[in-house]
């Protein structure tokens, strides 16, 4: 029905556009009425007339409407032109009128009817004009005598052209001349009627051409809807409408089953309370999880400190320079949080990292492997072993009591007389001095022909012989002390004639008499660095590290004989020592200490020190314990009964240890090093074999100054007092007393 | 033959105990996201085997953990849900809308209740791990429920509700202990059943969810935390004899006075519970009508006035009954018996907290963080109101003692009250005393806000203001504690005893006593100054200098004494006797100590610089 309505509207529109025809003919404006009436009256006669209709008119007609709409925009500019155009457009209508006049009045009725039909149909046919050439360019007839052909096929002659003056006069004179239009197509002048002019004016104004037409007439629904089904069908109801559907029944069965089985729940389930009392009243924490593993609670994040405050104390806010300096740091060292201060709470912005931090915490919670770590929350001081107080272990050297001045070069070696009255010292200034211990008086000075390397006092109290190593020589010097027996000493130091005979190239050493001093000289092939006496005072060893297989030699003073106990030596020998009571020889090489049984002539033990470079060694007076000093500043204490590994390693010095020493009577030992300190220890060895030695550090003695990169070069204990002598590179010897 | 024999499965050792993540996935027949979700919900985390038999770059889980997961009903539920989702999708594709709606309506749901019980078999366990859940819920409560972030609005609402319920509990039981405004947010620490629970709430500003986080992980956590905190809240409310969940006053909630809304409901419920027992008590019935009035949405001015009048009469009556509890009444928590019981159970700390803001009435300005302050004031026994409809009392109330503002200037000023910045409340709470408001007044830069979580003595650096606060505290305690003279004598006695016992200990004791003496001295000075009428803040500076000098003298004296005995510390030699391991450990500890010392030195240096700068400025002026 909508489409029918539309059609009507269109009809009326079309009628309006072709309205000129209608109004001219019967003056009845209401188009639709006549149209309806004439639907059935359409005759064949009118149709053959339609046949002649040229499309040109039709075109002109439709274009007049479109032109009008176009013109409305720029009408005012081209006034006259528009009028002309409109007039030309209207030409069709004029022609029609003229034609009708020609045909006669009897045809009036059917014609009007025919036009109505035409307007209804899609192909508009307009009454043919005088000229029948159709829609062809007029310039084709420009040079011809005629302008076209009339209905009868006769040529229509061109009219004679009017004189210009005449035409002008006609134009100006006649009051109706403005209505006259020249129709080029039909070559004639047409005079417009009043109505036509009016119509043109309306068209120009963009209104409907006919004053009588009301464009907004109330809509009348002509179709009578009552009792008429749509679409109209008269078919009887099919049978299927009366049979219950099989598929529907199946579906119902399915649904019923689903409802019965509870697959479909019709009413909403009762809402259980979301939360209830989950836990009882026991307030005991559980350690185990449900799967039997221990529960490791997530570590709690660190609680915020003052620096995180929105208004921290001034000292917590870093300066701009400090913040800039963070950029230069490694990323891991950079502080994660830079404190900021705000004047008031309202100025605090949202923390942009908040969500990120929470997210990272979430990741930590489920991605990080958790394990229980025992945190050592101990006081660092508790790590320091609890030792007996030094106070209780007195006496031990404590304070510097005396200084022995006189040497001009670093004092390399010192030795105390077995009686404890004298102190001998050898120095790089090529002298050996003898001091009275108690008074610090220098009794004698021996000037020698080379820097002294090492000195060792003969352990026999009645001899007073000092062994001095001078480069490749070993001097056995008679000190001529009052206590010694001069006859025995001179006898010992007299050159044995048998030795003289034995002198040859193959000999290990050469025994000879010293030219100036009352001394015996043992000449080695290489520089001798250390000399040690056997406890009985007859044998002594000399170590010349560079002498390869002859590095360690054992000399017998009474027979003035020398023997090389080793055919081969492993490593560079540092020092060699006799066991204080048994026939053993300790040989310290760079990293190990080897103990040789001199009777069986075999290696009895190899002590693994674990040190990089041994510098010195000392043996306890009982012979079962041994200390070794090294260049790393470590002392190793070996308990030979225990194992070949050190019983205790003490790292006490920063620099090379130069010497270590045991006290013969007191449970003391000491080490001196290039860092100008002497460390004094209590080293108690028990007779009970089950009890391990007790080692207690007692005192760090300072006092020497460092000279030429070296500190204290030697230290030794007094033979029967708890005193300690130290010889420094600053050419001073100091005595520390308790 | 031997070669063909099947390789036996290991029965002991790391390889038998642990499995890698990929193996676990194969065993459980699930994809990684689902595995991740299950791990989060079940609280399963990787463990570190002693020997990483498959390489150090892999994640190892305990076999028992994985077996535990394999027996989890959620695993099956997850699969069923997946199938169900497929059904819906299929129906959608076939445009079977009725089926889609039906399926959607009957979607199977699952609950995490059993997981809560499993992970936290006792209530204490749950409380112990409550830090993270609370922080997370408080964060999610502030989230924008935007579709672009994929955060369901329901979750946000639920988080908000749960966090408010928790806060209401904390406020009601007065178990809040410490609080701290940091740049990150506001920290709170409560003491519930002997467990210290610390949580962090973001500042009330809109959150922007960054792109580089996986919100699904967080949502899974939140899902579990919601259940956990729900049950914890239930248990806590149950222990108070309250109904859970409390019904929120919708109007108040709409006004963003959520905490108040919850609290109000609590008050009402507590009352109703008691009402059944005691109907005859006119005190109860009075308050009942009162609270009911408050509950009614049509709460006109006249009614308010009426209730106020009733309150006044109630308070009169209470004072006659010699029950110093004025503040609870306003909340409607007027149950006599319950309070009595509570009092018995309460420890000193709670009592102290409860009484801190007693008889104080606060009014909060528009610009201050209302929720946080309401929680604090309630938890410490105060009464608070705010600007807005349905507020308990108006700004023009005569009884208001403090108005909390955070703006440069205040238009109309009531002379009867003090205008303080919010930090004052926080500092008061942390120090358990009402600080002098002079430094916190409107428009001033407040003194530094210090963290209550730091043990200054242990850190080795005491900020200046901390000392001031300590002095104030001792001054306050001085009124209650035995006289300073007695205390001193006791200390000296102890000192004499300890001299015999241990020298180092005695040293500390000595220092302590001397410090005490100084504190006492300053206290005396303060008193005299107070009498003389010198304003407090001015005197702080001079006193500080005095005290610092005094301390220096003391330390010198203390140290000079033992050094004559032994000029060298015995430990220096004993260090040589340490085994290598101990020595290295000791050295490492020393490095740590040095670092700490360096930090302290830096702080001191900065402090000195800033002081110098200030002095210069003062000099210029």
Image (tube, helix red, strand yellow):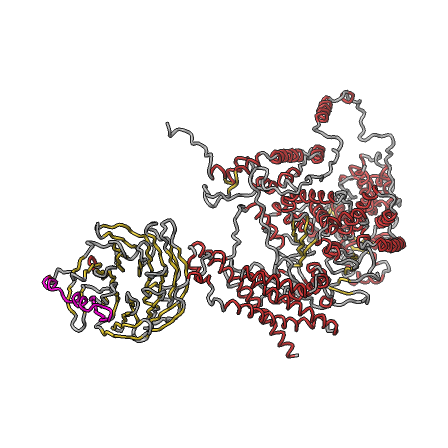
Question: Residue B376: x percent and y percent?
Answer: 73, 56
Q: Is residue A662 visible?
A: no
- A696 is higher (above) or lower (below) than A34: below
Question: Residue A682: x percent and y percent?
Answer: 39, 60
Is residue A496 rendered to the left or right of residue B116? left
Is residue B81 rendered to the left or right of residue B171? left
Q: Residue at x 46, y 59 (%)?
A: B587
Question: Residue B360: x percent and y percent?
Answer: 78, 59
> Quadrant where the C terminus of chain A lies?
bottom left
Question: Residue B45: x percent and y percent?
Answer: 56, 43
Is residue B194 rendered to the left or right of residue A603? right
Span of residues in magenta: A473-501
> Quadrant where the N terminus of chain A lies?
top right
- B33 is higher (above) or lower (below) than A475: above
Is residue B525 rendered to the left or right of residue B318? left
Residue A498 colored magenta?
yes
Residue A94 colored magenta?
no
Q: In this orientation, which residue lies closer to the viewer: B86 or A68?
A: B86
């Amino acid at each position: 029905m909508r489409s029918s309505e539309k059609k009507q509207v269109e009809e009326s529109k079309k009628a309006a556009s072709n309205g000129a025809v209608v109004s001219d003919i019967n003056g009845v404006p209401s188009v639709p009425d006549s149209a309806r009436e004439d639907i059935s009256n359409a005759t064949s006669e009118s149709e053959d007339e339609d046949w002649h209709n040229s499309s040109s008119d039709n075109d002109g007609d439709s274009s007049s409407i479109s032109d009008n709409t176009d013109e409305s925009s720029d009408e005012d500019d081209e006034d006259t032109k528009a009028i002309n155009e409109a007039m030309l457009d209207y030409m069709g209508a004029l022609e029609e009128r003229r034609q009708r006049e020609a045909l006669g009045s009897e045809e009036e009725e059917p014609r009007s009817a025919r036009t109505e039909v035409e307007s209804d149909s899609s192909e508009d046919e307009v009454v043919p004009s005088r000229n029948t050439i159709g829609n062809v360019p007029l310039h084709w007839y420009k040079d011809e005598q005629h302008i076209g052909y009339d209905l009868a096929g006769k040529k229509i002659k061109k009219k004679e052209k009017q004189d210009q003056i005449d035409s002008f006069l006609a134009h100006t004179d006649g009051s109706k001349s403005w209505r006259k239009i020249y129709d080029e197509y039909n070559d004639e002048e047409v005079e417009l009627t009043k109505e036509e002019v009016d119509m043109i004016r309306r068209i120009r104004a963009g209104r409907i051409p006919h004053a009588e037409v009301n464009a907004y007439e109330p809509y009348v629904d002509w179709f009578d809807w009552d009792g008429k089904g749509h679409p109209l069908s008269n078919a009887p109801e099919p049978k299927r409408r009366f049979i219950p559907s099989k598929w529907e029944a199946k579906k119902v069965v399915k649904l019923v089953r689903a409802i019965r089985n509870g697959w479909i729940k019709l009413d909403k389930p009762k809402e259980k309370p979301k939360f209830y009392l989950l836990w009882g009243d026991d307030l005991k924490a559980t350690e185990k999880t449900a799967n039997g593993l221990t529960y490791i609670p997530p570590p709690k994040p660190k609680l915020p400190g003052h620096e995180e405050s929105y208004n921290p104390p001034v000292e917590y806010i870093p300066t701009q320079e400090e913040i800039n300096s963070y950029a230069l740091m490694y990323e891991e060292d950079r502080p994660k949080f830079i404190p900021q201060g705000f004047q008031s709470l309202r100025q605090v912005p949202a923390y942009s990292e908040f969500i990120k931090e929470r997210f990272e915490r979430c990741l930590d919670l489920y991605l990080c492997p958790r394990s229980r770590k025992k945190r050592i929350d101990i006081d660092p001081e508790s790590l320091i072993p609890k030792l007996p107080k030094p106070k209780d272990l007195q006496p031990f050297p404590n304070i510097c009591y005396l200084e022995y001045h006189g040497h001009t070069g670093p004092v390399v070696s010192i030795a105390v007389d077995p009686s404890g009255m004298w102190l001998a010292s050898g120095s790089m200034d090529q002298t050996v001095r003898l001091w009275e211990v108690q008074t610090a008086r220098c009794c004698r000075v021996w000037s020698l022909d080379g820097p002294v390397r090492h000195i060792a006092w003969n352990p026999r109290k009645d001899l007073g012989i000092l062994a001095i190593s001078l480069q490749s020589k070993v001097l056995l010097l008679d000190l001529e002390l009052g206590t010694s027996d001069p006859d025995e000493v001179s006898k010992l130091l007299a050159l044995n004639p048998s030795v003289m005979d034995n002198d040859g190239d193959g000999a290990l050493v050469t025994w000879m008499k010293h030219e100036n001093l009352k001394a015996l000289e043992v000449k080695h092939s290489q520089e001798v660095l250390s000399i040690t006496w056997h406890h009985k005072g007859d044998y002594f060893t000399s170590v010349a590290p560079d002498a390869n297989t002859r590095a360690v030699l054992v000399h017998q003073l009474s027979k003035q004989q020398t023997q090389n106990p080793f055919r081969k030596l492993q490593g560079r020998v540092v020092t060699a020592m006799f066991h204080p009571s048994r026939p053993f020889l300790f040989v310290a090489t760079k990293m190990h200490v080897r103990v040789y049984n001199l009777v069986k002539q075999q290696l009895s033990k190899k002590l693994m020190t674990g040190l990089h470079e041994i510098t010195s060694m000392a043996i306890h007076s009982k012979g079962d314990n041994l200390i070794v000093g090294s260049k790393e500043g470590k002392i190793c204490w070996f308990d030979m009964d225990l194992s070949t590994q050190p019983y205790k390693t003490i790292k006490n010095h920063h620099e090379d240890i130069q010497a270590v020493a045991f006290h013969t009577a007191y449970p003391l030992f000491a080490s001196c090093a290039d860092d100008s300190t002497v460390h004094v220890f209590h080293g108690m060895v028990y007779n009970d074999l089950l009890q391990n030695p007790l080692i207690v550090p007692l005192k760090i003695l300072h006092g020497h100054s460092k000279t030429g990169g070296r500190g204290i070069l030697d230290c030794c204990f007094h033979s029967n007092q708890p005193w300690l002598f130290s010889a420094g590179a600053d050419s001073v010897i100091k005595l520390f007393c308790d | 033959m031997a070669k063909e024999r099947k390789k036996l499965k290991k029965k002991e050792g790391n390889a038998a105990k642990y499995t890698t993540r990929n193996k676990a996935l194969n065993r459980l027949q699930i994809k990684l996201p689902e595995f991740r979700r299950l791990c989060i919900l079940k609280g399963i985390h990787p463990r570190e085997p002693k020997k990483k038999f498959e390489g150090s770059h892999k994640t190892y889980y305990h076999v028992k953990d994985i077996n535990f997961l394999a027996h989890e009903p959620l695993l099956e539920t997850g699969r069923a849900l997946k199938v169900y989702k497929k059904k819906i999708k299929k129906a959608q594709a076939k445009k079977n809308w009725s089926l889609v709606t039906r399926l959607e309506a009957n979607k199977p749901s699952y609950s995490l209740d059993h997981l809560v019980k499993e992970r936290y078999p006792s209530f204490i366990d749950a409380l112990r791990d409550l830090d993270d859940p609370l922080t997370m819920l408080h964060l999610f409560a502030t989230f924008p429920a935007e579709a672009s972030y994929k955060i369901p609005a329901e979750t946000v609402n639920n988080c908000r509700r749960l966090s408010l319920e928790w806060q209401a509990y904390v406020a009601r039981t007065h178990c809040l202990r410490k609080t701290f405004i940091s740049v990150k947010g506001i920290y709170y620490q409560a003491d519930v059943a002997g467990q210290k629970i610390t949580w962090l709430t973001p500042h009330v500003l809109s959150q922007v969810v960054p792109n580089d986080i996986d919100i699904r992980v967080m949502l899974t956590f939140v899902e579990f935390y919601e259940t956990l905190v729900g049950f914890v809240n239930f248990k806590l409310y149950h222990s108070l004899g309250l109904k859970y969940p409390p019904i929120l006053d919708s109007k108040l909630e709409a006004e963003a006075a959520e905490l108040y809304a919850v609290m109000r409901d609590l008050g009402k419920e507590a009352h109703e519970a008691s009402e059944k027992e005691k109907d005859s008590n006119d005190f109860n019935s009075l308050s009942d009508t009162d609270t009911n009035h408050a509950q009614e949405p049509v709460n006109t001015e006249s009614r308010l006035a009426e209730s106020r009048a009733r309150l006044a009469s109630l308070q009169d009556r209470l004072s006659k009954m010699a029950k110093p509890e004025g503040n609870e009444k306003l909340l409607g928590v007027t149950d006599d018996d319950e309070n009595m019981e509570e009092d018995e159970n309460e420890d000193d700390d709670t009592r102290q907290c409860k009484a801190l803001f007693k008889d104080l009435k606060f009014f909060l300005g528009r610009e201050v963080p209302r929720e946080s302050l309401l929680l604090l004031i309630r938890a410490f026994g105060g009464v608070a109101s705010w600007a807005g409809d349905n507020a308990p009392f108006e700004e023009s109330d005569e009884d208001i003692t403090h108005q909390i503002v955070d703006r440069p200037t205040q238009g109309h000023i009531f002379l009867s009250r003090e205008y303080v910045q919010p930090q004052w409340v926080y500092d008061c709470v942390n120090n358990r005393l009402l600080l002098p408001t002079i430094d916190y007044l409107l428009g001033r830069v407040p003194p530094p806000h210090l963290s209550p979580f730091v043990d200054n003595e242990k850190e080795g650096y005491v900020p200046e203001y901390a000392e001031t606060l300590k002095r104030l505290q001792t001054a306050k305690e001085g009124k209650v504690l035995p006289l300073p003279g007695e205390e001193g004598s006791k200390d000296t006695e102890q000192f004499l005893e300890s001299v015999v016992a241990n020298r180092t200990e005695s040293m500390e004791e000595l220092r302590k006593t001397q410090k005490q003496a100084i504190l006492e001295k300053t206290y005396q000075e303060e008193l005299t100054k107070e009498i003389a009428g010198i304003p407090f803040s001015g005197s702080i500076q001079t006193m500080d200098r005095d005290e610092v000098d005094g301390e220096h003298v003391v330390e010198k004296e203390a140290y000079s004494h033992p050094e004559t005995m032994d000029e060298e510390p015995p430990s220096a030699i004993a260090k040589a006797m340490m085994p290598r391991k101990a020595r290295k450990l000791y050295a490492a500890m020393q490095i740590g100590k040095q670092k700490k010392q360096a930090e302290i030195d830096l702080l001191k240096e900065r402090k000195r610089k800033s002081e110098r700068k200030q002095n210069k400025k003062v000099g210029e002026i």
